[in-house]
Image (cartoon, coloured by chain):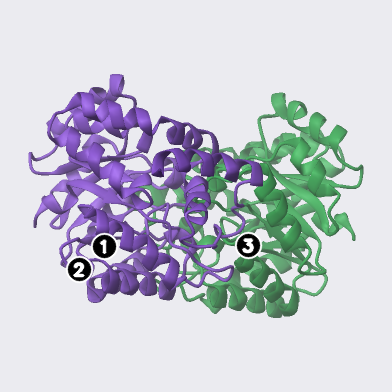
Chain colours: A purple, B green
Amino acid sequence: MSASLFHGLSAFPITPADEAGHVEESGLTLLLDRLNAAKVDSVGLLGSTGTYAYLSRAERLRAVEIAIGTVEATIPVIVGVGALRTDDAIDLARDAEKAGASGLLLAPVSYTPLGDEEVFQHFATVAGSTELPLCIYNNPSTTHFSFSPTLVARLSAVQNIVALKNPAVPAAEIETVLAPLRSALPEDFAIGFSGDWNAAGALLAGGKAWYSVIGGLLPVPALALTQAAQAGDRAEVARIDGLLQPLWSLFKELSSFRVMYAGANHLGLTQMQPPRPILPLSAADQRRVAEVLEHLVV
Amino acid sequence: MSASLFHGLSAFPITPADEAGHVEESGLTLLLDRLNAAKVDSVGLLGSTGTYAYLSRAERLRAVEIAIGTVEATIPVIVGVGALRTDDAIDLARDAEKAGASGLLLAPVSYTPLGDEEVFQHFATVAGSTELPLCIYNNPSTTHFSFSPTLVARLSAVQNIVALKNPAVPAAEIETVLAPLRSALPEDFAIGFSGDWNAAGALLAGGKAWYSVIGGLLPVPALALTQAAQAGDRAEVARIDGLLQPLWSLFKELSSFRVMYAGANHLGLTQMQPPRPILPLSAADQRRVAEVLEHLVV
């Protein structure tokens, strides 16, 4: 089972959908076309930015089918299959596998707070239900569960579980996250990072993947940053990361999720808005996003 | 719109369901029979303990129909209608109203963290979709959203929104929670509390309701405690609360949710377990629950 599926730039587009949660094929296709053109290393479909938690099983399958029909065969599609219930996550994993996904992302979605043993069994059961390689989706800000290196190590012994998507921390602290993971995990286990504004430091420190929100909308600079980091070109990484700072500021202030909808709207890719109760940005904040994008895109 | 629906002991049973999430009518009926016999002030169906977040719309409706068919007409049934999506919460509220519920409980379930304006619009939209009175379900440990007195005050001006279910804090701190709410809210707005081990103090401080986990399994002592508090009989409240201390210790250590399943199993009301990934207690911990219950029930 190759962990290299979970290397490089994984681009996480929004999943445009109407008010009833019906996925908009035209909008999703336009977003995916950009990822094809840039030749991202993988598409991270139905991540948190892709509103997986807000879509029905049927619509999640539709999104996978649209992606498999749109994304170039050379670019793997990795699909988020998180669900509150273990049986639902199994159904989603099997749906994704049948539809042609290359890998799975599994977040420990919770309502009742979960313990380590519960999360271990959940992951082992879902991983055992398909042949696809699986990445542990550690996202405490949305799932309210945090993976210890010990738990990740235990999961790394489960067949199919080959990668970790971890929230990045500032460059000055990244070794304190990476060192205990590296010492706990097999060498070929792929430790990657989300959290766009800390991604540059995480990649330079040896993170294998950037699970990137901005990569889902602006794959060109995201891929350039990733490749510069892979080449060890710190000056080029700093240059691109510097260009993206105004966007990182908006992400931190307004949430990357809401900014991505405003951005996709501004670029004319979709007119869809986040699922209620999540509100679109105010008109004033949408203009701020547009201004930042104009400077980046031009 | 009467807030008195949200006064007194509201008993929150588990919702027994099989591994596929199909509600077990016999188990739920046995639990509700106990609430009838004790004459609780209301039944809190499909609360957090009632696994509302883990059940499909169809099964949540089935649970409401079973409850309406079982609970004495003199006891109102209040139904949890929380959902990640606003449109889903509206559907659930209308289902509950059509099936004969007397009131609604709405928690701001989240995945993407929500802001105050998003929660305000979510609540106002759901409240406006039915004629039923609605209680704000403030449960930050599961929803990861916390209501400020300012937001509750704003919501109290919305038609149908008449009550608040707030997590209780230790008696020494309860006034610091109650005072700002009282000064922000209309006098007839019903401020009640969940969190069984702090309920006695919250009721004595003037909390209008106890949204009680233990009341869903052992309604007799829960109602006795509530009525003693309503009568201002501090000695009797302290006596009953003291009897229940071994249970509160288990709740704090093992979670009230998991303890309630072990308790209902021990009393022979159901053999169902929590929905996976949530695991039942270990055999050793189940025995500890059984021992505590034996001392209480006998």
Q: Quadrant of the C terminus of chain B?
A: bottom right
Q: Chain of mark 3?
A: B
Decide: few, some or many residues near mark 1? Use Cα within 10 Å; few <14, some 14-19, many ≥20.
Answer: many
Q: How many marks?
A: 3
Q: Is B249 on the left or on the right of B160, as rendered?
A: left
Q: Nearer the viewer, residue A72 or A44?
A: A72
Decide: few, some or many residues near mark 2? Use Cα within 10 Å; few <14, some 14-19, many ≥20.
Answer: many
Residue occupied by mark 2: A130
User: Which SS class for mark 1?
Assistant: helix
Q: Quadrant of the N terminus of chain B?
A: bottom right
Q: Nearer the viewer, residue A50 or B261?
A: A50
Decide: few, some or many residues near mark 3? Use Cα within 10 Å; few <14, some 14-19, many ≥20.
Answer: many
- Quadrant of the rendered image containing residue A144: top left
The percent position of residue B228, horizontal first and vertical second, equals 81, 43
Q: Which mark is residue A161?
A: none
On the question of residue A80 being in view, the answer is no
In the rendered view, tell whether residue A48 sits above or below residue A185: below
Name which residue type carries label 3. Answer: Thr
Residue occupied by mark 3: B86
Q: How far apart are labels 2 and 1 at the CA level?
A: 7 Å
Name which residue type carries label 1. Answer: Val
Name which residue type carries label 2. Answer: Thr
